[in-house]
Amino acid sequence: MSTFITGGRLVTEVDSYEASLLVEDGLIQAVGRDLAPPDDAEIYNVAGKLVMPGVVDVHVHVGLDLRGRRSSDFETTTREAAFGGVTTFLTYAMPAKGQTLLEAVESRLEEARGSSYVDFGAHAALVNWSEREDEEIPELIEAGVPSFKMFTVYSREGWKSGEEDLYRALLLTGRHGGLVEVHCENEWIIERKIRRLVAEGRLSALDHARSRPSYVEGEAVSNVLRVAYDAAAPVYIVHVSSGQAVEAIAEARELGVEVYAETCPHFLLLDESDLEGPLGHRKATCPPLRPPTHREALWEALEDGSIQVVATDHAEFRAADKDAGAGDFREIPMGVPGVGTLLPLMWHYGVGEGRMTENELVDRLCTEPSEIFGLQPSKGTLKAGSDADIVVFDPELRETVSPELLHGYADYSPYDGFEVRGWPVSTMVRGSWVVKDRELVGGRDHGTFVHRGPVCQRPGRRPDRVAGGAGPRDTGD
């Protein structure tokens, strides 16, 4: 059975035009203005609506254990994703003590199988470095998991990596076609500030933000990029939240470092004033929300291509879980929901407010994440031969954000009450409707593991998007 989607305006990373799509056997078989549907095709008329590639959210936490609380599982997370137009997501495999990276990934993917409405992949976390073997990284790349998460913080958890470990990982991934992504914060400064705040009895969510000022991120990003320069390997900076980090990325790129970066809707739309008041702790994250001046730097970086990706850092706890730490930020499970609101919020506040074009939105949410993380040519595009991951989007539909609208796990949203214009109405994953006309019609067993290929396709080798990127120049030092 084929599906013929007609009457809408197709929006890709480079163009928008009226055309029809023919879907068969899970793939986009043809795209054109003069296509005729096969006799047995399901005809879906989407007049007045937009047809986009499925969104690829490359930063999603599922079943995250923090402070004795556990975030949303695969079923609830991916149901919310499907309603929000996200058709593929990447989550994290964190190896336990004594567990290999491959064992951690296999365990994680087993959790997802049969419990995911949309397609999924994994990043492997490079923690417990004393147990790691060099062979683990090329083994995982061969297994379709070419990206590796590292941290410059969280020593107590055993997650922090020093410069030597980071350098070693960059050399290995660079040699074998993988990519290191790094959570960048200066732990020494953070710990010193926390000790002082605790001694003063300052333990609110806003005090948490004071313990991690923006220069803590900027300094750590600069340091990581110096290591990447020396290793001559690509690197990806997660959840960029500050102007200092943006400046460090721009400076490194001028030196020829192949650096990619993401930011998140909560850093673009919220600020530290949202941490005030009796419910401010529900918006507590790491890194924290910043003063309003940083938002403009992030929007400008999205516009000029310094930041190529918008992802969510989705970590969805219930309100009671967040409220348990209301009086002491050390007890708050950090993170906010976001996978269900990524597309509509970026449409309303990005496209609707003139900060990006509709093509740039598709580029940052669909195409570039796919190209950077090895999902091309299957994901992030509407080209013939690609997976039929398709979102039908109504640009005129007005909604007010609420938990009921999102169909997720949390009973709150950091964007509760936001009034937006533009919302996804139907989501197709590999040729099957998962959400159609705002009704859940697909099964939780539809999503499948995506074996990823070469990373850092520079995105699409488009020179206008990534300046430099050829690797560091040999200075003879």
Image (spheres, rainbow, N blue to C red):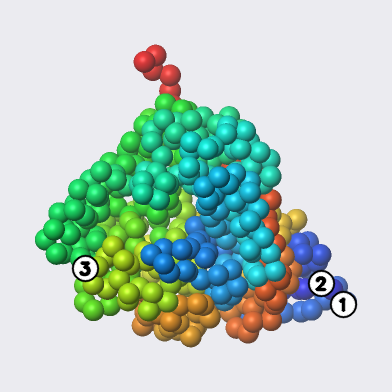
Position above or below: 211 against 11: above
- Closer to the eye: label 1 or 3: 3
Image quadrant for the N terminus?
Answer: bottom right
10 Å crowding of disc 2: few (<14), some (14-19), many (20+): many
10 Å crowding of disc 1: few (<14), some (14-19), many (20+): few
Q: Give the residue drawn at x 49%, y 83%.
A: 405
Which percent across, then down, holds residue 376? 65, 50
- Closer to the eye: label 3 or 2: 3
Residues under labels 1 and 3: Cα distance? 61 Å
Give the SS element for disc 3.
loop
- Which of the pair 183/331 is nearer the observer? 331
Determine whether label 1 and label 3 are within 8 Å by CB. no
Image quadrant for the C terminus?
Answer: top left
| Residue at which label 1 appears | 40
Give the SS element for disc 1.
loop
Tell me, for residue 63, which label it has, or none. Answer: none
Tell which circle, 1 or 2, labels the residue nearer the N-terminal end: 2
Residues under labels 3 and 2: Cα distance? 55 Å
Determine whether label 1 and label 2 are within 8 Å by CB. yes
Which percent across, then down, holds residue 208? 24, 61
Check disc 2 and give the amino acid type.
Ser
10 Å crowding of disc 3: few (<14), some (14-19), many (20+): many
| Residue at which label 3 appears | 204
Q: Quadrant of residue 274?
A: bottom left
Would residue 205 be found to the left or right of residue 363 on screen?
A: left
| Residue at which label 2 appears | 2
Is residue 54 among the parts visible in the rendering? no
Check disc 3 and give the amino acid type.
Ser
Would residue 167 be found to the left or right of residue 247 on screen?
A: right
Tell which circle, 1 or 3, labels the residue nearer the N-terminal end: 1
Check disc 1 and give the amino acid type.
Asp
- Which of the pair 334/466 is nearer the observer? 334
